[in-house]
Each structure stands twice: as C-alpha cells, then as structure tokens.
Amino acid sequence: MSFETTVTLFGVGIPVGVTATPGAADGDLTLTPSGFRIAGNVIDADTLRGQFGGVADPLVQTQSLCIADRLPAGLTLTSATVQGQDLVATFDIAGALLNDPALQANGTCG
C-alpha cells in the first residue's frame, strides 16, 4: 500500500510517499512502513533506521488503527494482506453472532 502527499517547506512543495505493509494485531489493522519516497529519492525503512537510529523510530514503527467501532462486536480482524490492488481482510466470527444482539452491535475502541 502506498500513500502520497505534498509537504510544503519554506514555500516549496516536496512530494512525500510512504509504502506500508498491512497486517493485524489484537483485532486492529496495522500498517508497517517499509519504504519512503522524498522528492523522488527512495529509501527503505531499514536504511532509514540505520542512518538515523532512534530518531527514525516514530517514522518506521508499526501503527495500529482500531476498526472495532466500525464492525459488529462479533467480528475480529485476524489478518490483512494486499493481493494485487485489493486489501484482503480475514476475520474470526463469533459463533453466536446471528443470535446475540450484543455481538451484532458495533464494537468499541479503547
């Protein structure tokens, strides 16, 4: 997955991009940065970490995004991968989902 934007620094627009690998942890969607593109220059996360050490940690660490409040409580995200141009997600489904209104209501983040 790639994300791109333009950052303005001293009045100059600089194109910035991040390539991230999706995953799942504790029901959350995770995004792990694997590469960066700054003004056309490409650098992978390991090289960035090697050059800047701990200063780069906030940029290269895995980010978790809670999606539980957008799904029925009876669904738990177990994996997320990219296949072609699609994000493919796998869920555990609680056995009582069809009969339990509490499991049918949206979950919570928290």
Image (spheres, rainbow, N blue to C red):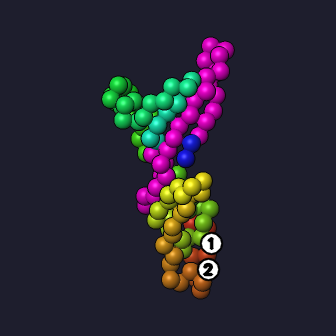
Residue 106 in percent (x, y) is at: 61, 67
State the residue at coordinates (64%, 28%): 6
Which labelled disc corresponds to residue 101? Answer: 2
State the residue at coordinates (46%, 41%): 33
Judge whether 10 appears above or below 86 on screen: above
Q: Can residue 69 be seen from the camera position used here? A: yes
Looking at the rendering, the stretch of residues picked out in magenta corresponds to: 3-32
Is 108 positioned to the left or the right of 23 in the image? Answer: right
Asked where in the image residue 109 lies, by quadrant, the reply is bottom right
Residue corresponding to mark 1? 105
Q: Can residue 58 be seen from the camera position used here? A: no
Q: Which amino acid does label 1 sit on?
A: Ala
Q: Nearer the viewer, residue 10 or 86?
A: 86
- Where disc 2 sits, the SS reads helix
Mark 2 → mark 1, Cα distance in angstroms: 6 Å
Name the magenta segment's main secondary structure. strand
Q: CB under 8 Å between callouts 2 and 1?
A: yes
Asked where in the image residue 38 lies, by quadrant, the reply is top right
Which labelled disc corresponds to residue 57? Answer: none
Asked where in the image residue 52 lies, by quadrant, the reply is top left
State the residue at coordinates (51%, 41%): 19
